[in-house]
Amino acid sequence: MVEDVFKISKNIETMGSQESRPDPGRFLEGVVFSDEHQAGFWRRVVASLVDFLVLYGLYVALFNVWLILAGSPGFNAFTFILAVTLGAAVYVAPLKRSWLRTVGYRVAGVRIVDLRGRQPSLLMLLLRGAINLVATGVVWIDFAWFLGQRPRQKLTDLLTGTYVVRTHAKPIAQSAIVPVYYALAGHFWVVHEVRKPSGIPVLND
């Protein structure tokens, strides 16, 4: 079980001050999506697989260009690594958050948003991409975590404050964003989640 792998302990911070308690009469920061509008397991698998193949194709194409131009002024290992890094960065950040989305996201019919239902920042998406790259060897853990989560978030989503939802998904409610503490692999992490809604206003279309 994922809980056994990470030895997870989770506690939502609760404070007695009036400021820490959501006021239904004022704007609440986070948004809530229904389960059916959140990207399910197989949609996430399809999106990840297609995007991996696209990025691999980009690597192969740039590698072949580098082989052809190797030895020419300005073409060396550094320029190859730089081109691959820049290409991947553009794909996982600016393109992913735009209306175009990545090929995988378009095929799977999903888009990415932050906890407020807006486009995630470029920095968060770059961080998310870097985490995915570093954790490639343990991607099964990311998806195993996803299977037991509500809302449906992978670890990378949890760490970067993102949701992957269906293309035309709309929030059904608002709720407060609260800090949550996890003990993962012997380290404590503080992330932010949208509090499970209870008696909060439903958003109108």
Image (cartoon, rainbow, N blue to C red):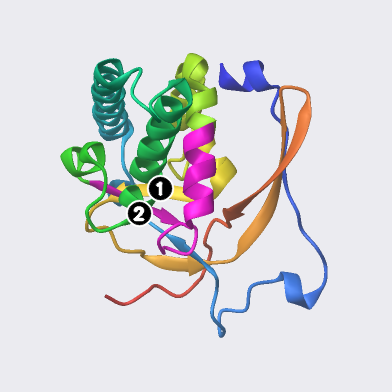
What's the amino acid at mark 1?
A: Ala
Do residues under tags 1 and 2 come within 8 Å of each other at their CB atoms? Answer: yes
In this orientation, which residue lies closer to the viewer: 87 or 46? Answer: 87
In this orientation, which residue lies closer to the viewer: 98 or 62? Answer: 62
Image quadrant in which the C terminus is located: bottom left
* Residue 41 at x, y percent in the picture: 32, 31
Residue for point 30% across, 57% down: 98
* Residue 115 at x, y percent in the picture: 50, 58
- In the picture of the structure, the residue carrying the numbered disc 1 is 93
- In the picture of the structure, the residue carrying the numbered disc 2 is 97
Q: Does residue 157 appear in the picture of this structure? A: no
**Residue farthest bottom in this picture:** 25
Compared to residue 135, the image places residue 181 above or below, namely: below
Residue for point 81% across, 63% down: 15
The tag on residue 25 is none
**Residue farthest right in this picture:** 16
* CA separation in Å, label 1 and label 2: 6 Å
Dot 2: element = helix
**Residue farthest left in this picture:** 107
In which quarter of the view is residue 104 placed? top left
Residue 21 vs residue 123: left or right? right
Badge 2, how many Cα within 10 Å: few under 14, some, many 20+? many
* Residue 119 at x, y percent in the picture: 40, 61
